[in-house]
Amino acid sequence: MNSPSTFTGWSQNELAEWRERVLKVESETGSAGHPLVHRANFDKFVLTRSAATWHQVQYWFSQLPGKWAFRGQNDATWRLATSLERATTLTVKVGENTGDMLLDPSFNEQNLLAEFQRRSKQYLKHLPDESDTLSWLSLMQHYGAPTRLLDWTYSPYVGLFFAVQRLILNDDGAPKPSGLWAIDLSRLQQAGWSRVGDKLQGIFQAPTLRSRCEQMNGAIFSPSSPSVVILADPLSLDERMAAQQSTFLYALGSNFNFDIVLLGMISSTLDSPIVQKLEIAASARIEILSELEKANITAASLFPGLDGFARSLGDRLEISVNRFANMIG
């Protein structure tokens, strides 16, 4: 596919500019009043592009060789934060200073898990083994309980659907661009490998998914686990997770700020960015939804059941109304 003249893929100049930016961040550490691993620096280590058409999105996909995971967010400015982090964050003001604090997320996560395990038998017949913590957490995440898991997908098109499925407006009513995150899983694994001790090497080199999950189950609530983001594929997948080609990223250790733990990993390598983000113009949303529908990437296919089908009817109507508006406009 020939790329549009206004949209180019990676170039040596672009990578050189990215390296120059992150080297500058490292050299200025402390001068801005905060350390290198600080939320203010996260976006500087992310290679961010923009797209305003379906073809530009496809071209961006073609520039991602290897194995990647994707996460779509309706607002490109939203940071990477887990539902547990959002649920336990309290904004406080001390004097003239305002900041966020986490209200014991580890304690709350374990309490929520225990309560979910105790009560879920009333609602579900088939449940994970009690010791399979990762599968329990993924089940909680699936049904909307706060967890430290962050949803990703192996499919760029599924991630794209979640990025554009809902329109977010500014305070003045103008539509905001959506964001599609991509993370290089091979490079993430390499960065994680150097951060874990011998006891946790099995998380990265276990021969089977089951043995890898056993290693993760033992590390999830361990206070001695290092601060590292790991790929977390549970043993149990339900129909919806399978349809969405779901996977999870999980931040081990005592730091529950997902983006801070991830920054500690991606800031240690300067050959090329581990994390990328595509900012998608709101004007491209209907075109993208229409093209995804042609590929059967819809709410009906991603959320098997009557609720997903009903949602897909709303999307289809929105596409039709916009087509008509363009015809008469």
Image (cartoon, rainbow, N blue to C red):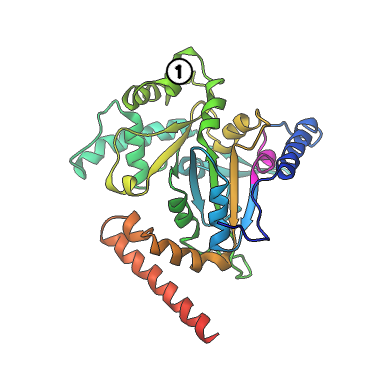
Image quadrant assignment for residue 310: bottom left
Q: Is residue 106 visible?
A: yes
Q: Is residue 178 visible?
A: no
- Amino acid tagged 1: Leu
| 325 sits to left or right of 315 | right
State whether the magenta stretch is mostly helix, strand or loop.
Answer: helix
Q: Which quarter of the rendering shows the C terminus?
A: bottom right
Q: Position of residue 26 (x, y in %)?
A: 75, 31
- Return the residue nearer the eye: 169 or 312: 312
Residue at point 53% right, 50% down?
61
Residue at point 46% right, 31% down?
106
Give above or below for 299 relative to 37: below
Q: Is residue 180 magenta?
A: no
Q: Secondary structure at mark 1?
A: helix
Q: Which residue is mark 1?
A: 200
Give above or below for 51 relative to 19: below
Give above or below for 112 relative to 308: above
Q: Position of residue 132 (x, y in %)?
A: 30, 28
Give above or below for 180 relative to 108: below
Where does the magenta region start and end?
37-47
Q: Position of residue 279 (x, y in %)?
A: 60, 55
Furthest residue in direction bottom, as rendered: 328
Q: Which quarter of the rendering shows the N terminus?
A: bottom right
Furthest residue in direction front, as rendered: 2
Q: Is residue 40 magenta?
A: yes
Residue at point 34% right, 22% down?
211
| 278 sits to left or right of 157 | right
